[in-house]
Amino acid sequence: MTEQPLLTAEDLRLSFGETKALDGASLHVWAGEVVALMGSSGSGKSTLLHCLAGILTPESGRVGYAGRDLSAMSDTERSALRRGEFGFVFQFGQLVPELTCRENVALPLRLTGTGRREAHRTATEWLERLEVADVADKRPGQASGGQGQRVAVARALVGRPRVVFADEPTGALDSLNGELVMKLFIAAAKETGAAVVLVTHEARVAAYSDREAIVRDGVVREQEYVR
Amino acid sequence: MSVSFALLGLLENGPRHGYDLKRTYDDTFGRDRELHYGQVYSTMARLLKNGLVEVEAEPGVGPDRKRYAITDAGVTDVAEWIGRAEKPEPYLQSTLYTKVVLALMTGRDATDVLDAQRTEHLRLMRELTRRKSGGDIADELICDHALFHLEADLRWLELTAARLDRLASRIRS
C-alpha cells in the first residue's frame, strides 16, 4: 500500500504514578476511516485517544499527523491544530450551558473567524442534519441527553475536521438513543470524509466502525487494515 | 419446529396453496433462509396426518391444486405455541469453552482463541449494523436481536480473557 496513514502513534509510553497507562502503544489511522478503540476500563484506550489528539503528551514515542510530529510542536501550534483540523465528542459536559444549542454549534466557526450570520446559518444546517433543529434556540440543559449528544456531534463536525475524536460518545445514553447518535454521527462523518477515532467499551457501538483496535494493558492489538 | 408452527399460523387468516404459503413465509420470516417447496409439502403432509390442517381440493391435478386450511386443533396448537416461553439457551459458548480449556491444557495460546473469536463476532456485528442502517423496521428488529446476543457472547469473551490466568492454574492443578 502506498497511501500514508493520516494519524500515527508509534510506541507510546505514559505512566500515571506507578500505573503504566500506555506501554508501547502503536496505531495507524487512515483518512476517512472509522476506528474503534476497545478495551476494558483501565486498558489505556482513553489515554491513547488523548495522546493522539494532542491533549496529553506521551513520555516517549511519537504521534504523527499528516507527516508532522505533534510532540515537536509548540502548545500554540497544537491548539491551532486541534481547533482547525480536529473535532471532539465526549461523554458529556462539552456544550457551553449559557449558550443556545445553535450558538454552541456555531462556536468553532466563530473561533476561526467566520461571521455570526454565516456561522449561525451553517450551524442550523448541521442541527437539521443531526435531526435536532427543534432545540436550536434552547440551551443544552433544556435538551434531552440524546439531543445534547447530537448537538455535540454537530459541533464536532461543523468545522469539517479531518479527524473526530469521540470518547464514549454514547456512554451516558440508553441504547435506543445511543444507536441514533451513532447512526447519524457515522453517516455524517462518512459524508464529510472525516476519520473517526472512537473509544468505546460497547461492542454494539464499535459495530459502527470500519475496524477495531483492541487496547489491553497499554498495548494495542491492531486489526489489519483492509480498504 | 418453529417452521411448522409458522406455516400453520399463516393459515389462520384463510386457506392457502402450497406455493403461496412458501412465498408468504419467505417474505415474512425467510430473510436469509428461504424454504424449499419440498419442505413446505412435507410439513403440510405431517400437519395433515396430525389433523392440524385439512385439504380443500380443487378441480385438476398436481400438488398446487391443494388448498390447505387450518383446523380447530391447529388453531389451538398455534395459540399454545405462541403463548409458550422459549427455553433460554445458556450454553451456546460450550464449544468455545472447550477450545479455550484445550488450548490451555496443550500449551497453546488461549488469548489467540479468544481474539480470533472476538474479531469474527465484531465482523458479523458490523455486517448486521450495516444491514440494519439500510433496512426497514423488520430488518432493524431482526438484526438487533442477533446483535444483542452477539454482544452478550463478547462480554463473556472479555471476562474469560481477563480470567485466563485463574482458569489456567485450575486446569494445571
Image (spheres, grey):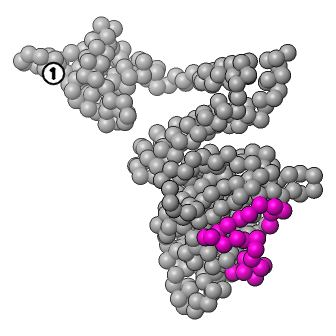
Outermost residue to the top: B49
Residue B111 in which image quadrant: top right
Residue A169 in which image quadrant: bottom right
Q: Which residue is at 60% across, 55% downward?
A: A35
B159, A25: nearer the viewer: A25
- Vertical order, A190 against A103 (above or below): above
Q: Is residue A130 left or right of residue A143?
A: left
Residue type at the position of mark 1: Asp
A158, B106: nearer the viewer: B106
Q: Residues within 10 Å of mark 1 (few under 14, many from 20)?
A: some
Q: Which segment is the magenta one?
A: A57-80
Q: Position of residue B87 (x, y in %)?
A: 57, 21
Q: Which residue is mark 1?
A: B64
Q: Is residue A71 magenta?
A: yes
Q: Is residue A60 magenta?
A: yes
Outermost residue to the left: B60
Q: Does residue A162 show up?
A: yes
Q: Position of residue B75 (x, y in %)?
A: 37, 20
Q: Does residue B11 show up?
A: no
Q: Which residue is at 65% across, 36% downward?
A: B115
Q: Position of residue B121 (x, y in %)?
A: 57, 37
Q: Chain of mark 1?
A: B
Q: Which residue is at 44% across, 47% downward?
A: B131
Q: Is residue B75 left or right of residue A200?
A: left
A43, A183: nearer the viewer: A43
- Vertical order, B128 against A103 (above or below): above
Q: Is residue B67 left or right of residue A154?
A: left
- Vertical order, B172 against A149 (above or below): above
